[in-house]
Image: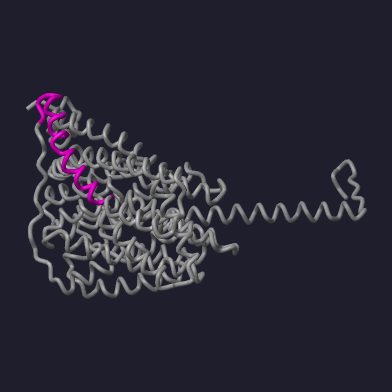
Amino acid sequence: MEGTCLASTCKSGSAMVINTPMPSGTILMFLAGAALLIIGMGFFTMGADMAMMPMGEGIGIQLTKSSKLLLILLVSFIMGVLITIAEPDLQVLAKQVPSIEPSMVLILTVALGVGFFLMIAVLRTLFKIRLSILLVIFYIITFVIAYFAPNTFIPVAFDSGGVTTGPITVPFILAMGVGVASIRSDKNSQDDSFGLVALCSIGPILAVLLLGIFYKPGSAEVESHIVHQAATSRDVVTFFAIGFPHYFEDVVKALGAIVAFFVVFQLMSRRYKRHQLGRIAVGFLYTLIGLVVFLTGVNVGFIPVGHLLGSQLAASPFKWVLVPFGMLVGYFIVAAEPAVHVLNKQVEEISSGAISQKMMNRGLSIGMAAALAITMLRILLGIPIMWILIPGYTFALVLAFFVPRMFTGIAFDSGGVCSGPMTSTFLLPLAMGTCEGVGRDLMIDAFGIVAMVAMTPLIVIQLLGLVYRSKLKSSDELSRDTLEAMAQDDSGIIIEYDYEGAV
């Protein structure tokens, strides 16, 4: 069949080219999926700004006005569970883990973990508990429990923590954090508005590890993804048209629970005016359209191609090309994550422009490139995932005590945000295909890529925080010297200089 090649080898004179037998119809499917991804991301971002973020911030403010702590915790728990069940990333991951049937078992376990830790996150903000201390405590608990969990289940557990914080969860939790923190008037209130996503990423890991200990998951094989063979552009349209109603139904069910809760909240609090409700309703519509188009594009056009690329490249004599290829994909794929744009915009607003969206994007891109390179090396060499996670998280947690508090929250939020839809729908199939190509265990080696993606930004962003702190300190010292000079000048002291610059 005609097409571009990427994994078999061709010789032309003395040159050797790496190529893979990829039909032109498959490439067309991939390009069509990319187009839908861009359109869907545009609609989703607009919808998140109009609906999810105002709703999350409003609920956060309204909750803190209540003197009933139990009510605050209950509402936080319910919202954590609902938005997690609605998270499309989790749906994708659950369907790719055959050792837990039905998939709703994994989904509910993760949702309960998010709900419980969202309560802890709200309590941290209200009682001004330092985020780094909680992170150290809970990650120590996590790695202790991981010691008793099945080895084949640890990567899935850490992946669950990453995919939970996706395009629906992140805008709501970030805005809720801002709403809760806005009630406080102390100097650390803005810093504490970040960190909710970080804590909510730990909950699913703990919950799924406990599930692995008591549920005793089996060793079912992961199904290979079917690559649609499209001979004409009409076939491409047909494949996407077939997938569209399925994802529309999934998104409607997911968003329906959130809409129902919002209606009850509005009836009880009467917080939003008529024009605000109209704007939020339009925002929900944009979110619905964006997520349906986005998920259709990535599931129909991206998952099969990712699996094919991984398997073909890994089976070639030049399988080590996967390392630089992974770095390249990781660096540029950040721009395709919808929740990243939400986080970057909010970080720029909260920091009053000190941390720009461009700076955040560059830091996250470097982190993603490192994550993909490490993942490909881990698969090719068969390195146990804990050999990377333990030193990585240890270093990240140590940095948390030396960087500004805001950067700790941003860094750990960024880790969850980066592991969004593109990770679960393209990078995970890429890793699964690579495992098949080199003959590795899918449950041990393929899963864990989300955990890598979620870990590296923790280090990169905090290193960025150290640079920011150093520059801020230098600026303060310069300002202090200037003020002292001005004070001396105002006191009437005259400083004369000779022509050689000596006093």
Q: Nearer the viewer, residue 198 or 323?
A: 198
- Which residue is rendered at x = 35% and y = 57% of the image? 264
User: Which quarter of the figure has residue 18?
Assistant: top left
Using the rendered view, name the quadrant where residue 241 is placed.
top left
Q: Does residue 462 lie above or below 327 as drawn?
A: below
Residue 234 located within the stretch drawn in magenta: yes
Residue 84, percent from left and from top: 29, 57
| Residue 408 in sight here | no
Closer-to-camera residue (79/276): 276
Magenta stretch: helix, strand or loop mostly = helix
Task: Please check the rendered image and state whether residue 343 is part of the magenta-colored stretch, yes or no.
Answer: no
Task: From the top left corner, tell me how far across and down residue 321 is, in percent.
Answer: 23, 42
- Which of 466 and 212 lies nearest the eye of the viewer? 212
The reply, left or right, for residue 192 in relation to residue 2 is right
Q: Residue 139's spot in the image, x, y percent?
A: 35, 70
Give the residues in magenta. 230-255
Residue 114, can we see it? Answer: yes
52 relative to 359 in the view: left or right: left
Q: Position of residue 284 (x, y in %)?
A: 34, 44
Quarter of the picture holding the N terminus: top left
Here the colouring is one colour
| Left or right: residue 91 compared with residue 437 | right
378 vs 225: above or below: below
Of residues 286 and 91, which is closer to you in this image?
A: 286
Count of number-bearing discs? 0
* Residue drawn where x is 17% and y is 70% of the image: 150
| Residue at x 26% of width, y 58% of height | 159
